[in-house]
Image: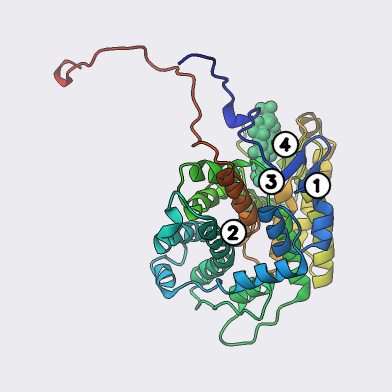
Amino acid sequence: QSGYITLDYGYKNTGATTSAITFLDGEEGILHYRGYPIEQLAEQSSFLEVAYLLIYGDLPTKDQLAHFEHEIKIHTLVNEDVRKIFDGFPVNAHPMGVISSLVCALTAFYPESTNPDRNQEMIELTIIRLLAKMPTLAAWAYKNSQGHPVNYPKNSLDYCSNFLYMMFALPVEEYEVDPVIVDAMNKLLILHADHEQNCSTSTVRIVGSSQASLYSAVSAGINALWGPLHGGANQAVIEMLEAIKNDGGDATKYLNKAKDKNDPFRLMGFGHRVYKNFDPRARIIKKSADQVLGKLGIKDPVLDIAKQLEEAALSDPYFVERKLYPNVDFYSGIIYRALGIPTEMFTVMFALGRLPGWIAQWKEMISNKEPIGRPRQVYVGSTKRDYVPLDKR
Ligand code: SDX
């Protein structure tokens, strides 16, 4: 082939596309969704309004939002054939594995979504179905892990309240939704909603670029997000903080482990490929952690350990030189825990939040008619050699 191949492991300096959805400035710690600062959206918007903004490009009018919310409500139910798939999962199946399988199964249930010349109507229906059914599938994955009966969605509830109800309601008692928990969940989902070309979004784009269905592309994105270096970090952070607490709570000891190249231990929730001064989402979540725990009257010792770790790292040359700061995953698990979300569901919460971003990026790629993703390589293997018959080897 003529021309040069630029080798760029991890695509650290490669722009894979143009996009009008999310703007990041890593040096200044800026994050905008369609031009709106994340700080304003986190304080003033709702998750479904942000989902609309990301997917359709503008903040909705009152009627547009009402219609969008109504469309989602009428598609929240997941049919019994999908629920029967749950019966096949063992109780200890990780919820991320369960929802990635079920989201992919939606391709089998809605085969028209794989039609290459998807018309606009089919695209819109596929988007609404996915936004509506993912919370139900996520809550059912949790119920499956508890060996509890599933709860069907209640359309009298808003998006976050419905999810919390499906997650926590039990047949034996009434479930009251706590507005403090709903508000905190709303904010967390907004903060996770999109983040330009991160690992899982790039996965959704590349799978979607082969004209696979949106369900298949998002199922692949869920699996990419699951990795501990990406969205799986929020679960890894809590496990790390718990380990530090159980080992006497000595933050410095673990900071030194993280600096030791011979020690595989990493300070989970620290560092970012793009943000080199601070992650604006981490700032908002840290503030919110204090507020939520205060309102719920919860004292969580790992929050103090997290703050000690952050303080020590911010004055440690190893971290300062490498521009390592807390990222979105560092404090989010502490809030999820305060909301009663179990650790194994933390990354599922990340996936619920990121879903509108994945959808918006897939939709942008489809409407821009971008080519199938197919990077090149620099070959470093054997030069040409002839086959040696088995009896001669
Ligand atoms: C998310 O891309 C996105 O936008 C992702 C995300 C999103 O919203 O989609 O923001 C969500 O995934 C946040 C990141 C969650 N992951 C973690 O918290 C896991 C711990 N962090 C690291 O593994 C790492 O910082 C990454 C994966 C986040 C970034 O990896 P990079 O950019 O490839 O950086 P690197 O691994 O090349 O590290 C550079 C240096 C290395 O040291 P040297 O070889 O230069 O001596 O920093 C060191 C690394 O060893 N380093 C760390 C560290 N992170 C990087 N050392 C100790 N602890 C860490 N956490």
Counting other residues with Cα less than 10 Å from the Cα at mark 2, is it few (<14), some (14-19), or many (20 or more)?
A: many
Residue 59 position within the rendered picture, expressed as x and y whole percent measured from the top left: 76, 58
For the residues marked 3 and 4, what is the alpha-carbon distance in whole angstroms?
Answer: 10 Å
Q: Which residue is mark 3?
A: 195
For the residues marked 3 and 1, what is the alpha-carbon distance in whole angstroms?
Answer: 12 Å
Name the quadrant containing residue 73.
Answer: bottom right
Q: Secondary structure at mark 1?
A: helix
| Quadrant for the N terminus in the image | top left
For the residues marked 2 and 3, what is the alpha-carbon distance in whole angstroms?
Answer: 17 Å
Q: Secondary structure at mark 4?
A: loop
Q: Nearer the viewer, mark 3 or mark 4?
A: 3
Foreground residue, 130 or 268? 130
Q: Nearer the viewer, mark 3 or mark 1?
A: 3
Q: Which residue is mark 1?
A: 280
Q: Amino acid at mark 2?
A: Val
Query: Which residue is pictured at 74% across the width and 45% down the height?
Result: 327
235 left or right of 305? left
Residue 210 position within the rendered picture, expressed as x and y whole percent measured from the top left: 46, 42
The image's mark for residue 274 is: 4
- First of labels 2, 3 by sequence position: 3
Q: Amino acid at mark 1?
A: Pro
Query: Which residue is pictured at 60% across the width and 53% down the height?
Result: 359
Labelled pair 2, 3 in contact (Cβ < 8 Å): no
Ligand 1 neighbours mark 4 (CB distance < 8 Å): yes
